[in-house]
Image: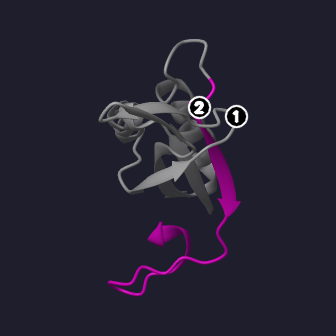
Amino acid sequence: MKLIVAVIQPTKLEAAQRALAAIGVTRMTIADAMGFARQRGHIETYRGHEYQTQLLRKIELQIAVNDDFVDPVLACLEEHARTSKEGHIGDGKAFVLPMEQVIQISDGLEGPGAV
Protein backbone atom coordinates (compact mmCIF):
# COMPACT_ATOMS: atom_id res chain seq x y z
CA MET A 1 0.00 0.00 0.00
CA LYS A 2 1.27 3.45 -0.92
CA LEU A 3 0.25 7.05 -0.42
CA ILE A 4 0.80 9.24 -3.46
CA VAL A 5 1.04 12.93 -2.61
CA ALA A 6 0.93 15.09 -5.74
CA VAL A 7 1.29 18.86 -5.85
CA ILE A 8 -0.13 20.27 -9.10
CA GLN A 9 -1.29 23.51 -10.69
CA PRO A 10 -4.86 24.50 -9.74
CA THR A 11 -5.80 24.76 -13.41
CA LYS A 12 -5.00 21.07 -13.94
CA LEU A 13 -7.14 19.70 -11.10
CA GLU A 14 -10.24 18.96 -13.15
CA ALA A 15 -8.29 17.20 -15.93
CA ALA A 16 -6.33 15.15 -13.40
CA GLN A 17 -9.53 14.14 -11.55
CA ARG A 18 -11.24 13.01 -14.77
CA ALA A 19 -8.20 11.03 -15.90
CA LEU A 20 -7.77 9.36 -12.52
CA ALA A 21 -11.46 8.43 -12.45
CA ALA A 22 -11.06 6.86 -15.90
CA ILE A 23 -8.39 4.47 -14.59
CA GLY A 24 -10.45 3.54 -11.53
CA VAL A 25 -9.17 5.93 -8.86
CA THR A 26 -12.34 7.16 -7.18
CA ARG A 27 -11.07 8.24 -3.76
CA MET A 28 -8.65 11.05 -2.98
CA THR A 29 -8.19 13.99 -0.68
CA ILE A 30 -7.76 17.41 -2.26
CA ALA A 31 -6.39 20.42 -0.40
CA ASP A 32 -5.31 23.94 -1.26
CA ALA A 33 -1.59 24.43 -0.76
CA MET A 34 0.91 27.27 -0.99
CA GLY A 35 4.56 26.89 -1.80
CA PHE A 36 7.50 27.60 -4.04
CA ALA A 37 10.48 25.84 -5.52
CA ARG A 38 12.46 26.88 -8.58
CA GLN A 39 9.76 29.43 -9.53
CA ARG A 40 10.63 31.59 -6.53
CA GLY A 41 7.34 33.50 -6.62
CA HIS A 42 6.32 36.31 -8.93
CA ILE A 43 5.37 40.00 -8.96
CA GLU A 44 1.71 40.97 -8.54
CA THR A 45 -0.08 44.31 -8.60
CA TYR A 46 -2.71 45.24 -6.05
CA ARG A 47 -4.36 48.68 -6.14
CA GLY A 48 -1.52 50.08 -8.19
CA HIS A 49 1.27 48.78 -5.96
CA GLU A 50 3.61 46.02 -7.04
CA TYR A 51 4.74 43.42 -4.55
CA GLN A 52 6.70 40.19 -4.68
CA THR A 53 4.83 37.05 -3.66
CA GLN A 54 6.98 34.18 -2.46
CA LEU A 55 4.23 31.58 -2.16
CA LEU A 56 2.28 30.33 -5.15
CA ARG A 57 -1.10 28.61 -5.04
CA LYS A 58 -1.04 24.85 -5.70
CA ILE A 59 -3.37 21.91 -5.20
CA GLU A 60 -2.31 18.87 -3.15
CA LEU A 61 -3.79 15.48 -3.97
CA GLN A 62 -3.46 12.59 -1.54
CA ILE A 63 -4.25 9.25 -3.13
CA ALA A 64 -4.02 5.97 -1.21
CA VAL A 65 -3.52 3.03 -3.58
CA ASN A 66 -2.60 -0.63 -3.53
CA ASP A 67 0.84 -1.42 -4.94
CA ASP A 68 -0.44 -2.41 -8.40
CA PHE A 69 -2.04 1.03 -8.90
CA VAL A 70 1.10 3.12 -8.22
CA ASP A 71 2.53 3.13 -11.76
CA PRO A 72 -0.78 3.82 -13.55
CA VAL A 73 -1.58 6.70 -11.17
CA LEU A 74 1.87 8.25 -11.61
CA ALA A 75 1.66 7.92 -15.41
CA CYS A 76 -1.81 9.47 -15.38
CA LEU A 77 -0.68 12.41 -13.26
CA GLU A 78 2.41 12.94 -15.39
CA GLU A 79 0.30 13.09 -18.54
CA HIS A 80 -2.69 15.11 -17.32
CA ALA A 81 -1.16 17.49 -14.77
CA ARG A 82 1.38 18.97 -17.19
CA THR A 83 0.58 22.45 -18.46
CA SER A 84 1.96 21.64 -21.93
CA LYS A 85 3.36 18.71 -23.88
CA GLU A 86 6.92 19.56 -22.86
CA GLY A 87 6.05 20.60 -19.31
CA HIS A 88 7.15 23.73 -17.43
CA ILE A 89 8.79 24.62 -14.15
CA GLY A 90 6.00 24.73 -11.58
CA ASP A 91 3.90 21.90 -13.02
CA GLY A 92 4.32 20.05 -9.72
CA LYS A 93 5.70 16.89 -8.19
CA ALA A 94 4.43 13.51 -7.02
CA PHE A 95 5.78 11.69 -3.98
CA VAL A 96 5.23 8.01 -3.22
CA LEU A 97 5.21 7.12 0.47
CA PRO A 98 4.79 3.71 2.12
CA MET A 99 1.64 3.11 4.17
CA GLU A 100 2.11 0.63 6.96
CA GLN A 101 -1.50 0.30 8.03
CA VAL A 102 -4.94 1.41 6.88
CA ILE A 103 -8.14 1.16 8.90
CA GLN A 104 -11.55 1.97 7.47
CA ILE A 105 -13.25 3.81 10.31
CA SER A 106 -16.84 3.00 9.34
CA ASP A 107 -16.55 -0.78 9.71
CA GLY A 108 -13.04 -1.47 11.00
CA LEU A 109 -11.83 -3.10 7.78
CA GLU A 110 -7.99 -3.18 7.70
CA GLY A 111 -5.26 -3.56 5.11
CA PRO A 112 -5.43 -3.39 1.31
CA GLY A 113 -9.20 -3.90 1.32
CA ALA A 114 -9.62 -0.63 3.21
CA VAL A 115 -7.82 1.33 0.52
Vertical side of 58 occupied by 79: above or below: above
Q: Secondary structure at mark 1?
A: loop
Left or right, residue 88 beside residue 76: right
Does label 1 or label 2 sit earlier along the sequence?
Answer: 1
Residue 42 picture quarter:
top right
Q: Which residue of the protein is positioned furthest toward the bottom in this rendering?
A: 108
Specify few, some or many for label 1: CA neighbours under 10 Å numbering under 14, 14-19, or 20 or more: few
Query: Where residue 81 sits in the image (x, y, percent)?
Result: 49, 30
Compute the Cα span from label 1 to label 2.
Answer: 7 Å
Residue 19 visible here = no
Q: Nearer the viewer, residue 115 or 91?
A: 91
Q: Which residue of the protein is positioned furthest toward the top in this rendering?
A: 85
Query: Where residue 107 sits in the image (x, y, percent)?
Result: 35, 86
Q: Secondary structure at mark 2?
A: loop
Specify few, some or many for label 2: CA neighbours under 10 Å numbering under 14, 14-19, or 20 or more: some
Query: Where residue 24 sits in the image (x, y, percent)?
Result: 39, 44
Residue at the (49%, 55%) spot, across then down: 63
**In this picture, which residue range is highlighted in magenta?**
89-115
Q: Amino acid at mark 1?
A: Arg
State if disc 2 and disc 1 touch (CB < 8 Å).
yes
Question: Label for residue 98?
Answer: none
Residue 19 picture quarter:
top left
Residue at the (59%, 38%) spot, across then down: 74
| Residue corresponding to mark 2 | 90
Q: Amino acid at mark 2?
A: Gly
Vertical side of 63 occupied by 46: above or below: above
Assign the N terminus to one quadrant of the image. bottom right
| Residue corresponding to mark 1 | 38
Left or right, residue 12 beside residue 82: left
Residue at the (66%, 50%) spot, across then down: 95
Left or right, residue 81 beside residue 49: right
Query: Where residue 34 sits in the image (x, y, percent)?
Result: 50, 51
